[in-house]
Image (spheres, rainbow, N blue to C red):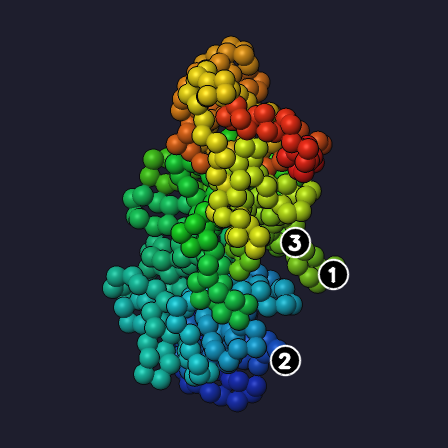
């Protein structure tokens, strides 16, 4: 039994006709005859129309004999999503998926069997005796869901795109929103539920023709209250922490007139969700195979998806792109340079435009105000208008001079910044990463003071070459 929306159930008890020919005996509880029309060219799926009294529902009973080349759909003319089998791109393999009903270019938002594909068109979907959704193909049986034994289970494809299984009391036993693919729809969650152990994350496709799990995953770091894109086990991008209204490294969220984002943390569950202001808009966030999180909106006038917002939208926003003690600048080539007093850890790798190894200090620091054999002590080089590195520590002082003195006299301190009356310092156990030179028009840039050995300070001031400041358009 399968429902289209709440309140409708279908049992195969009368007759069904395909293009006028009867293919199943019995009939339906609330209609005498159902007509099944083959899909238009290029579409997989079919429409079901009830004679006399059209019911907004999906026919579960048909799934026992409907082949994958047809698929099955929510037949409501005012429906939003369809559920069926599809073949991605030009491939000849079949997956169970959910896609938009009114979007002419098939756009899949959920895949039920990412880890196992079917190579024949005989695959069919059914509700098993124990209440689970199962794909059957010859002698192969693939469980889409894994719930305990239940009877009288019904499935419902909601207008939100959420496929749910319910018991006879309409309690939700399973829902596709708890098992995302690559698409973050309104009402879905990004985060985790500690009580159930459930993790809501979004993993890219392997390729445009292969929806199996790919390299990039969108997750929520509850400790740092930030969204992160992981490339395997490596951090690729971070949104910065949630400040109560926006994620700190995504300032354009201030001007988001499309949706209301909500951050929830109640001890058991920590997640982000969003709800569009205009419910008529069709929109989605996708964890793309390129490593970008992209927001799309459907433009009915042009019949195409409009890329509204990508992250990271610049190379310098890729996490640690220039490695440790490197600094990135979108307005220069190459994008990466070493901080003053540092040099590439591997010049060979940098020559190949691989900056991930970062930079290493040319001259070791003295400690505090101690001088070297030439009478040179440590000092500071100012780098104006930068995006500060991660993991600063706050120091309670009242002036920039006191902030500088605190860092200079602390052998563990390698840099400081003073902004808005707040002193922050960075310790030597940290590799300064994710620094970026910002443009003069970017109001978020802050002056950064890097501790250098006296010899490197002299070299910087006497060098006949262009300094880092000119190289990076300071």
Residue for point 41% across, 41% down: 221
Q: Is residue 14 left or right of residue 18?
A: left
Residue 244, percent from left and from top? 51, 31
Image quadrant where residue 269 sits: top left
Give the distance between the C-alpha atoms of the residues marked 2 and 3, in whole angstroms. 27 Å
For image coordinates 62% across by 54% down, the residue present is 296
**Residue assigned mark 1:** 302
Which secondary structure, mark 3?
Answer: strand
196 relative position to 443: left or right: left
Report the front residue among 130 and 190.
190
Q: Earlier in the sequence, mark 2 or mark 3?
A: 2
Measuring 59% from the left and 44% from the top, which residue is drawn there?
A: 336
Q: Which residue is mark 2?
A: 41
Residue 282 vertical placement versus 445 (above, below): below
Query: Most extreme residue toward the right, as rendered?
Result: 301
Residue 328 visible? The answer is: yes
Q: List the residue tagged with mark 3.
A: 307
Give the structural element (helix, strand or loop) at label 2: loop
**Crowd rating for badge 1 (residues with CA inside 10 Å; few <14, some 14–19, many 20+):** few
Name the foreground residue: 395 vs 468.
468
């Amino acid at each position: 039994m399968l429902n289209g929306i709440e309140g409708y159930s279908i049992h195969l008890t009368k007759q069904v006709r395909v293009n006028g020919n009867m293919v199943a005996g019995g009939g339906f509880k609330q209609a005498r005859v159902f007509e099944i029309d083959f899909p238009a060219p290029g579409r997989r799926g079919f429409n079901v129309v009830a004679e006399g009294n059209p019911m907004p529902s999906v026919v579960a009973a048909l799934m026992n004999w409907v082949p994958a080349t047809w698929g099955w759909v929510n037949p409501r003319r005012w429906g939003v999503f369809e559920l069926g089998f599809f073949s991605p791109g030009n491939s000849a393999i079949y997956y169970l998926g959910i896609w938009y009903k009114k979007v002419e270019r098939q756009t899949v938002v959920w895949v039920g069997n990412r880890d196992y594909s079917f190579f024949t068109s005989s695959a069919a979907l059914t509700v098993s005796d124990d209440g689970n959704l199962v794909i059957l193909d010859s002698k192969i049986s693939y469980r889409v869901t894994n719930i305990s034994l239940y009877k009288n289970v019904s499935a419902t494809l909601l207008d939100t795109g959420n496929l749910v299984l319910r018991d006879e009391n309409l309690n939700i036993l399973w829902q596709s929103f708890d098992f995302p693919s690559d698409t973050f729809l309104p009402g879905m969650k990004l985060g985790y539920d500690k009580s159930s152990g459930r993790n809501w994350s979004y993993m890219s496709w392997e390729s445009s023709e292969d929806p199996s799990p790919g390299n990039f995953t969108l997750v929520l770091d509850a400790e740092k209250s930030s969204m992160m894109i992981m490339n395997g086990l490596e951090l690729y991008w971070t949104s910065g922490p949630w400040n109560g209204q926006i994620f700190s490294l995504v300032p354009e969220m201030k001007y988001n007139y499309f949706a209301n984002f909500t951050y929830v943390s109640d001890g058991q569950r920590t997640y982000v969700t969003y709800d569009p202001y205009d419910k008529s808009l069709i929109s989605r966030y996708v964890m793309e195979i390129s490593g970008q999180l992209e927001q799309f909106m459907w433009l009915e006038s042009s019949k195409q998806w409009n890329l509204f917002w990508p992250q990271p939208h610049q190379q310098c926003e890729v996490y640690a792109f220039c490695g440790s003690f490197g600094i990135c600048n979108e307005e220069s080539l190459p994008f990466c340079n070493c901080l003053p007093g540092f040099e590439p850890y591997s010049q060979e790798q940098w020559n190949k435009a691989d900056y991930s190894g970062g930079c290493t200090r040319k001259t070791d620091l003295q400690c505090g105000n101690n001088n070297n054999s030439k009478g040179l002590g440590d000092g500071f080089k100012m780098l104006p208008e930068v995006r500060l590195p991660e993991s600063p520590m706050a120091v309670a002082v009242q002036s920039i001079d006191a902030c500088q003195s605190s860092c200079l006299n602390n052998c563990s301190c390698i840099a400081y910044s003073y902004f808005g009356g707040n002193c922050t310092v960075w310790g030597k156990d940290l590799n300064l990463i994710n620094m970026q030179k910002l443009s003069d028009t970017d109001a978020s840039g802050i002056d950064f003071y890097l501790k250098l050995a006296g010899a490197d300070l002299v070299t910087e001031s006497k060098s006949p070459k262009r300094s880092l400041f000119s190289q990076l358009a300071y």
